[in-house]
Image (cartoon, rainbow, N blue to C red):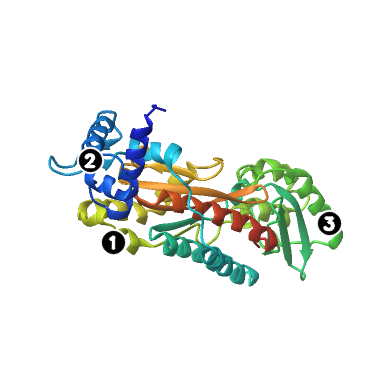
Amino acid sequence: METLSQRERDVLQSLIQIHIAMAVPVSSQAICRRHLSEVSPATVRNTMMDLEKKGFLHQPHTSAGREPTDKGYRHYVDSLMKREALTSEEKQLLRDKFHSHLKNRDTEYVFNEISRTIAQLSHQLGIVLFPRFEEGILQKLELVPLDRKRVLVIITVTSGLIKTITVEINRPSKFSNGKRKILISRKKLKEACQLLNERLSGLSIKEIRQSIQQRLGYSSQKAPELFGFFIEEANRIFRFNSPRELFLEGRTNIMLQPEFEDHHRLAQLMEFLDKQESVISLLNRQAGKQGVVVTIGSENALSQMRTCSLVTSTYNIGDLWGTVGMIGPTRMRYSKYISLLEYTAKLMNELLSEYPLA
Protein backbone atom coordinates (compact mmCIF):
# COMPACT_ATOMS: atom_id res chain seq x y z
CA MET A 1 0.00 0.00 0.00
CA GLU A 2 1.25 3.45 -0.92
CA THR A 3 2.66 5.44 1.97
CA LEU A 4 1.07 8.81 2.77
CA SER A 5 2.38 11.56 5.02
CA GLN A 6 0.48 12.27 8.22
CA ARG A 7 -1.00 15.45 6.73
CA GLU A 8 -2.14 13.56 3.63
CA ARG A 9 -3.73 10.95 5.86
CA ASP A 10 -5.51 13.60 7.92
CA VAL A 11 -6.82 15.43 4.85
CA LEU A 12 -7.96 12.24 3.11
CA GLN A 13 -9.74 10.99 6.22
CA SER A 14 -11.44 14.34 6.80
CA LEU A 15 -12.50 14.70 3.18
CA ILE A 16 -14.02 11.21 3.05
CA GLN A 17 -15.93 11.71 6.29
CA ILE A 18 -17.42 14.97 4.97
CA HIS A 19 -18.20 13.48 1.56
CA ILE A 20 -19.97 10.46 3.10
CA ALA A 21 -22.12 12.78 5.19
CA MET A 22 -22.85 15.48 2.59
CA ALA A 23 -22.68 13.68 -0.79
CA VAL A 24 -21.02 16.69 -2.48
CA PRO A 25 -17.45 17.54 -3.57
CA VAL A 26 -15.46 18.76 -0.57
CA SER A 27 -13.50 22.03 -0.49
CA SER A 28 -10.38 22.87 1.51
CA GLN A 29 -12.42 25.43 3.49
CA ALA A 30 -14.89 22.72 4.55
CA ILE A 31 -12.06 20.49 5.78
CA CYS A 32 -10.51 23.33 7.81
CA ARG A 33 -13.86 24.37 9.20
CA ARG A 34 -14.94 20.90 10.27
CA HIS A 35 -11.75 19.00 11.11
CA LEU A 36 -8.40 20.75 10.61
CA SER A 37 -8.85 24.26 11.96
CA GLU A 38 -5.15 24.52 12.82
CA VAL A 39 -4.15 24.21 9.15
CA SER A 40 -4.70 26.91 6.52
CA PRO A 41 -7.02 26.28 3.53
CA ALA A 42 -4.08 26.89 1.18
CA THR A 43 -2.06 24.13 2.84
CA VAL A 44 -5.05 21.75 2.70
CA ARG A 45 -5.64 22.65 -0.94
CA ASN A 46 -2.03 21.82 -1.84
CA THR A 47 -2.31 18.52 0.01
CA MET A 48 -5.52 17.72 -1.88
CA MET A 49 -3.70 18.36 -5.15
CA ASP A 50 -0.96 15.93 -4.10
CA LEU A 51 -3.57 13.29 -3.22
CA GLU A 52 -5.22 13.81 -6.59
CA LYS A 53 -1.91 13.25 -8.39
CA LYS A 54 -1.51 9.99 -6.45
CA GLY A 55 -4.99 8.82 -7.47
CA PHE A 56 -6.75 9.09 -4.09
CA LEU A 57 -9.00 12.02 -5.08
CA HIS A 58 -10.54 13.44 -8.23
CA GLN A 59 -12.12 16.76 -9.14
CA PRO A 60 -15.49 16.31 -10.92
CA HIS A 61 -15.55 19.94 -12.10
CA THR A 62 -12.83 22.58 -12.44
CA SER A 63 -14.38 24.92 -9.87
CA ALA A 64 -15.62 22.17 -7.57
CA GLY A 65 -14.05 20.56 -4.55
CA ARG A 66 -12.78 16.99 -4.65
CA GLU A 67 -14.24 13.53 -4.10
CA PRO A 68 -12.59 10.25 -3.13
CA THR A 69 -11.70 7.71 -5.82
CA ASP A 70 -12.09 3.97 -5.27
CA LYS A 71 -8.40 3.96 -4.35
CA GLY A 72 -9.05 6.68 -1.79
CA TYR A 73 -11.92 4.71 -0.22
CA ARG A 74 -9.77 1.57 -0.13
CA HIS A 75 -7.00 3.36 1.74
CA TYR A 76 -9.57 4.83 4.11
CA VAL A 77 -11.19 1.46 4.89
CA ASP A 78 -7.88 -0.39 5.28
CA SER A 79 -5.80 2.21 7.12
CA LEU A 80 -7.66 5.33 8.30
CA MET A 81 -11.18 4.41 9.31
CA LYS A 82 -12.21 4.22 12.96
CA ARG A 83 -14.89 1.63 13.56
CA GLU A 84 -18.23 2.79 14.98
CA ALA A 85 -19.85 0.42 17.45
CA LEU A 86 -23.53 -0.43 17.24
CA THR A 87 -25.71 1.12 19.91
CA SER A 88 -27.34 -1.11 22.51
CA GLU A 89 -30.71 -0.27 20.91
CA GLU A 90 -29.52 -1.43 17.48
CA LYS A 91 -28.15 -4.68 18.89
CA GLN A 92 -31.40 -5.34 20.75
CA LEU A 93 -33.45 -4.66 17.61
CA LEU A 94 -31.43 -7.23 15.68
CA ARG A 95 -31.63 -9.80 18.48
CA ASP A 96 -35.39 -9.35 18.95
CA LYS A 97 -36.10 -9.62 15.23
CA PHE A 98 -34.18 -12.88 14.86
CA HIS A 99 -34.91 -14.63 18.12
CA SER A 100 -38.71 -14.63 18.06
CA HIS A 101 -39.03 -16.02 14.54
CA LEU A 102 -36.26 -18.62 14.85
CA LYS A 103 -37.89 -19.85 18.05
CA ASN A 104 -41.06 -20.41 16.05
CA ARG A 105 -39.04 -22.22 13.36
CA ASP A 106 -40.10 -19.73 10.71
CA THR A 107 -36.76 -19.88 8.89
CA GLU A 108 -37.69 -18.19 5.63
CA TYR A 109 -39.44 -15.33 7.38
CA VAL A 110 -36.53 -14.64 9.73
CA PHE A 111 -34.02 -14.59 6.86
CA ASN A 112 -36.21 -12.05 5.13
CA GLU A 113 -36.38 -10.03 8.36
CA ILE A 114 -32.58 -10.10 8.65
CA SER A 115 -32.19 -8.54 5.21
CA ARG A 116 -34.98 -6.05 5.97
CA THR A 117 -33.38 -5.02 9.28
CA ILE A 118 -29.94 -4.54 7.66
CA ALA A 119 -31.62 -2.31 5.08
CA GLN A 120 -33.45 -0.41 7.83
CA LEU A 121 -30.34 0.26 9.92
CA SER A 122 -28.01 1.04 7.01
CA HIS A 123 -30.37 2.76 4.56
CA GLN A 124 -28.77 0.55 1.91
CA LEU A 125 -29.75 -2.73 0.29
CA GLY A 126 -29.78 -5.63 2.78
CA ILE A 127 -28.91 -9.13 1.50
CA VAL A 128 -28.91 -12.63 2.99
CA LEU A 129 -27.83 -15.73 1.06
CA PHE A 130 -29.30 -18.97 2.40
CA PRO A 131 -26.76 -21.57 3.62
CA ARG A 132 -25.05 -23.69 0.98
CA PHE A 133 -26.53 -27.04 1.95
CA GLU A 134 -25.02 -28.61 -1.18
CA GLU A 135 -21.69 -28.63 0.69
CA GLY A 136 -23.12 -30.34 3.80
CA ILE A 137 -21.81 -33.83 4.59
CA LEU A 138 -24.31 -36.65 5.07
CA GLN A 139 -23.99 -37.91 8.62
CA LYS A 140 -26.70 -40.57 8.54
CA LEU A 141 -29.84 -41.60 6.75
CA GLU A 142 -32.81 -43.30 8.43
CA LEU A 143 -35.79 -45.10 6.88
CA VAL A 144 -38.98 -45.37 8.94
CA PRO A 145 -41.94 -47.38 7.55
CA LEU A 146 -45.22 -45.45 7.70
CA ASP A 147 -47.57 -47.96 6.07
CA ARG A 148 -47.45 -50.75 3.47
CA LYS A 149 -46.02 -48.57 0.70
CA ARG A 150 -44.73 -45.33 2.23
CA VAL A 151 -41.38 -44.71 3.95
CA LEU A 152 -40.22 -41.66 5.92
CA VAL A 153 -36.66 -40.73 4.94
CA ILE A 154 -34.72 -38.79 7.60
CA ILE A 155 -31.51 -37.16 6.36
CA THR A 156 -29.03 -35.64 8.82
CA VAL A 157 -26.01 -33.61 7.71
CA THR A 158 -23.05 -32.77 9.91
CA SER A 159 -24.22 -29.19 10.51
CA GLY A 160 -27.14 -30.55 12.54
CA LEU A 161 -29.62 -29.85 9.75
CA ILE A 162 -32.32 -32.49 9.44
CA LYS A 163 -34.59 -33.06 6.46
CA THR A 164 -37.55 -35.42 6.38
CA ILE A 165 -39.39 -36.53 3.26
CA THR A 166 -42.05 -39.17 2.71
CA VAL A 167 -41.52 -41.41 -0.33
CA GLU A 168 -43.89 -43.87 -1.98
CA ILE A 169 -41.81 -46.84 -3.07
CA ASN A 170 -44.58 -49.12 -4.34
CA ARG A 171 -44.69 -47.72 -7.88
CA PRO A 172 -43.19 -48.64 -11.27
CA SER A 173 -39.60 -47.71 -12.03
CA LYS A 174 -37.04 -48.61 -14.67
CA PHE A 175 -35.33 -50.84 -12.11
CA SER A 176 -38.40 -53.05 -11.68
CA ASN A 177 -39.25 -53.26 -15.41
CA GLY A 178 -42.75 -51.99 -14.69
CA LYS A 179 -43.73 -55.18 -12.86
CA ARG A 180 -46.05 -55.35 -9.84
CA LYS A 181 -44.22 -54.22 -6.72
CA ILE A 182 -43.35 -56.44 -3.80
CA LEU A 183 -43.86 -54.70 -0.47
CA ILE A 184 -40.67 -54.18 1.51
CA SER A 185 -40.46 -55.88 4.87
CA ARG A 186 -39.04 -54.15 7.92
CA LYS A 187 -36.06 -56.46 7.79
CA LYS A 188 -35.41 -55.64 4.14
CA LEU A 189 -35.86 -51.93 4.87
CA LYS A 190 -33.29 -52.12 7.68
CA GLU A 191 -30.80 -53.87 5.40
CA ALA A 192 -31.37 -51.30 2.67
CA CYS A 193 -30.86 -48.45 5.14
CA GLN A 194 -27.57 -49.95 6.28
CA LEU A 195 -26.39 -50.24 2.67
CA LEU A 196 -27.44 -46.68 1.87
CA ASN A 197 -25.40 -45.39 4.82
CA GLU A 198 -22.38 -47.46 3.80
CA ARG A 199 -22.48 -46.07 0.27
CA LEU A 200 -23.47 -42.45 0.95
CA SER A 201 -22.36 -41.36 4.46
CA GLY A 202 -19.40 -38.99 4.43
CA LEU A 203 -20.26 -37.59 1.00
CA SER A 204 -21.50 -34.06 0.42
CA ILE A 205 -25.10 -33.60 -0.65
CA LYS A 206 -23.82 -32.36 -4.01
CA GLU A 207 -21.66 -35.48 -4.47
CA ILE A 208 -24.60 -37.74 -3.62
CA ARG A 209 -26.85 -36.10 -6.18
CA GLN A 210 -24.17 -36.30 -8.86
CA SER A 211 -22.99 -39.89 -8.28
CA ILE A 212 -25.89 -41.81 -6.73
CA GLN A 213 -26.50 -43.78 -9.95
CA GLN A 214 -22.97 -45.20 -9.86
CA ARG A 215 -23.01 -45.80 -6.10
CA LEU A 216 -26.38 -47.59 -5.94
CA GLY A 217 -27.01 -48.80 -9.48
CA TYR A 218 -25.64 -52.33 -9.16
CA SER A 219 -27.38 -52.74 -5.78
CA SER A 220 -30.80 -51.84 -7.18
CA GLN A 221 -31.74 -55.45 -7.85
CA LYS A 222 -31.68 -56.15 -4.10
CA ALA A 223 -34.49 -53.65 -3.45
CA PRO A 224 -35.66 -52.27 -6.81
CA GLU A 225 -38.57 -50.28 -5.38
CA LEU A 226 -36.38 -48.44 -2.87
CA PHE A 227 -33.05 -48.01 -4.66
CA GLY A 228 -34.79 -47.23 -7.93
CA PHE A 229 -36.68 -44.45 -6.19
CA PHE A 230 -33.53 -43.02 -4.62
CA ILE A 231 -31.70 -43.00 -7.97
CA GLU A 232 -34.56 -41.51 -9.95
CA GLU A 233 -35.60 -38.96 -7.30
CA ALA A 234 -32.18 -38.01 -5.88
CA ASN A 235 -32.59 -34.36 -6.92
CA ARG A 236 -35.79 -34.12 -4.89
CA ILE A 237 -34.77 -36.25 -1.89
CA PHE A 238 -31.39 -34.60 -1.45
CA ARG A 239 -32.44 -31.01 -2.14
CA PHE A 240 -32.06 -28.73 0.88
CA ASN A 241 -32.42 -25.33 -0.75
CA SER A 242 -34.90 -22.87 0.68
CA PRO A 243 -37.80 -21.91 -1.62
CA ARG A 244 -35.96 -18.59 -1.62
CA GLU A 245 -32.21 -18.86 -1.77
CA LEU A 246 -31.66 -15.10 -1.81
CA PHE A 247 -33.31 -12.52 0.46
CA LEU A 248 -32.95 -8.93 -0.68
CA GLU A 249 -34.66 -5.89 0.86
CA GLY A 250 -34.30 -2.11 0.58
CA ARG A 251 -34.48 -1.25 -3.10
CA THR A 252 -36.12 2.06 -2.22
CA ASN A 253 -33.06 2.98 -0.15
CA ILE A 254 -30.87 2.70 -3.25
CA MET A 255 -33.28 4.71 -5.37
CA LEU A 256 -33.12 7.60 -2.88
CA GLN A 257 -29.31 7.85 -2.95
CA PRO A 258 -28.11 10.96 -4.86
CA GLU A 259 -25.67 8.81 -6.85
CA PHE A 260 -28.65 7.20 -8.57
CA GLU A 261 -30.39 10.34 -9.75
CA ASP A 262 -28.86 9.23 -13.05
CA HIS A 263 -31.74 7.05 -14.26
CA HIS A 264 -29.56 5.05 -16.64
CA ARG A 265 -27.20 4.08 -13.83
CA LEU A 266 -30.15 3.18 -11.59
CA ALA A 267 -31.79 1.09 -14.33
CA GLN A 268 -28.57 -0.90 -14.83
CA LEU A 269 -28.33 -1.69 -11.13
CA MET A 270 -32.03 -2.64 -10.84
CA GLU A 271 -31.73 -4.91 -13.86
CA PHE A 272 -28.77 -6.64 -12.22
CA LEU A 273 -30.61 -7.06 -8.90
CA ASP A 274 -33.56 -8.63 -10.72
CA LYS A 275 -31.31 -11.46 -11.92
CA GLN A 276 -31.14 -13.61 -8.80
CA GLU A 277 -28.52 -15.99 -10.21
CA SER A 278 -26.18 -13.08 -10.96
CA VAL A 279 -26.48 -11.71 -7.42
CA ILE A 280 -25.90 -15.18 -5.94
CA SER A 281 -22.84 -15.62 -8.17
CA LEU A 282 -21.50 -12.27 -6.96
CA LEU A 283 -21.97 -13.27 -3.31
CA ASN A 284 -20.42 -16.70 -3.88
CA ARG A 285 -17.18 -14.97 -4.88
CA GLN A 286 -16.81 -14.06 -1.21
CA ALA A 287 -16.94 -17.73 -0.17
CA GLY A 288 -14.44 -18.78 2.46
CA LYS A 289 -13.21 -15.27 3.22
CA GLN A 290 -12.87 -14.47 6.90
CA GLY A 291 -14.38 -11.47 8.66
CA VAL A 292 -16.13 -8.60 6.89
CA VAL A 293 -15.13 -8.19 3.24
CA VAL A 294 -15.46 -4.81 1.51
CA THR A 295 -15.39 -4.68 -2.31
CA ILE A 296 -15.30 -1.09 -3.58
CA GLY A 297 -16.45 0.19 -6.97
CA SER A 298 -14.05 -0.90 -9.73
CA GLU A 299 -12.89 -3.84 -7.58
CA ASN A 300 -16.20 -5.49 -8.53
CA ALA A 301 -15.92 -7.71 -11.59
CA LEU A 302 -19.41 -6.84 -12.85
CA SER A 303 -19.88 -3.57 -14.71
CA GLN A 304 -23.28 -2.91 -13.06
CA MET A 305 -21.53 -2.81 -9.67
CA ARG A 306 -18.67 -0.44 -10.60
CA THR A 307 -20.36 2.52 -8.87
CA CYS A 308 -21.30 0.45 -5.80
CA SER A 309 -19.65 -1.20 -2.85
CA LEU A 310 -20.46 -4.69 -1.61
CA VAL A 311 -19.92 -5.37 2.10
CA THR A 312 -20.34 -8.98 3.26
CA SER A 313 -19.71 -11.32 6.15
CA THR A 314 -20.03 -15.09 6.42
CA TYR A 315 -22.22 -16.86 8.96
CA ASN A 316 -21.92 -20.56 9.77
CA ILE A 317 -24.22 -23.42 10.65
CA GLY A 318 -21.85 -26.19 11.64
CA ASP A 319 -19.75 -26.86 8.55
CA LEU A 320 -22.13 -24.95 6.27
CA TRP A 321 -22.01 -21.26 5.49
CA GLY A 322 -24.13 -18.46 4.10
CA THR A 323 -23.60 -14.77 3.42
CA VAL A 324 -25.06 -11.63 4.95
CA GLY A 325 -24.32 -8.29 3.37
CA MET A 326 -25.33 -4.99 1.83
CA ILE A 327 -25.00 -3.09 -1.44
CA GLY A 328 -24.84 0.68 -1.70
CA PRO A 329 -22.97 3.48 -3.49
CA THR A 330 -19.23 3.70 -2.85
CA ARG A 331 -20.05 6.74 -0.71
CA MET A 332 -21.25 4.74 2.28
CA ARG A 333 -20.70 4.77 6.02
CA TYR A 334 -18.20 1.92 6.10
CA SER A 335 -17.22 2.58 9.72
CA LYS A 336 -20.74 1.72 10.93
CA TYR A 337 -21.79 -0.86 8.36
CA ILE A 338 -18.78 -3.11 8.91
CA SER A 339 -19.72 -3.28 12.60
CA LEU A 340 -23.35 -3.95 11.67
CA LEU A 341 -22.51 -6.94 9.47
CA GLU A 342 -19.94 -8.30 11.88
CA TYR A 343 -22.48 -8.29 14.70
CA THR A 344 -25.24 -9.69 12.49
CA ALA A 345 -23.11 -12.64 11.37
CA LYS A 346 -22.06 -13.32 14.97
CA LEU A 347 -25.69 -13.21 16.11
CA MET A 348 -26.76 -15.57 13.33
CA ASN A 349 -24.01 -18.04 14.29
CA GLU A 350 -25.22 -17.93 17.87
CA LEU A 351 -28.96 -18.24 17.23
CA LEU A 352 -28.75 -20.76 14.40
CA SER A 353 -26.72 -22.95 16.73
CA GLU A 354 -29.43 -22.63 19.38
CA TYR A 355 -32.28 -23.14 16.91
CA PRO A 356 -30.83 -25.26 14.05
CA LEU A 357 -32.65 -25.14 10.73
CA ALA A 358 -34.91 -28.01 9.81
- The relative height of residue 171 versus residue 60 in the rendered view (above or below) is below
- Which residue in the rendered view is the most extreme toward the left? 63
Tag 2 or tag 1, which sits nearer the N-term? 2
> Residue at point 24% right, 35% down?
43
Q: Is residue 190 left or right of residue 321?
A: right
Question: Which-is-in-front pick, marks 3 and 1?
Answer: 1
Residue 190 has which mark? 3
Q: Residues within 10 Å of mark 1 (few under 14, many from 20)?
A: few
Q: Is residue 274 left or right of residue 263?
A: right
> Residue at point 60% right, 72% down?
100
Give the residue type that dot 1 points to. Answer: Leu
- The relative height of residue 157 versus residue 2 in the rendered view (above or below) is below
Q: Is residue 192 left or right of residue 64?
A: right
Q: Is residue 348 left or right of residue 324?
A: right
Asked if marks 1 and 2 touch (Cβ < 8 Å), the reply is no
The CA distance from mark 1 to mark 2 is: 33 Å
Can you give x and y, in whole percent of width and height, for residue 152 in the image?
Answer: 73, 64
Q: Which residue is mark 1?
A: 256
Where on the picture, by quarter, is residue 62? top left
> Residue at point 25% right, 48% down?
30
Give the residue type that dot 2 points to. Answer: Pro
Can you give x and y, in whole percent of width and height, for residue 307 in the image?
Answer: 30, 45
State the SS at label 3.
Answer: helix
Residue 41 has which mark? 2
Give the residue type that dot 3 points to. Answer: Lys
- Is residue 202 among the parts visible in the rendering? yes
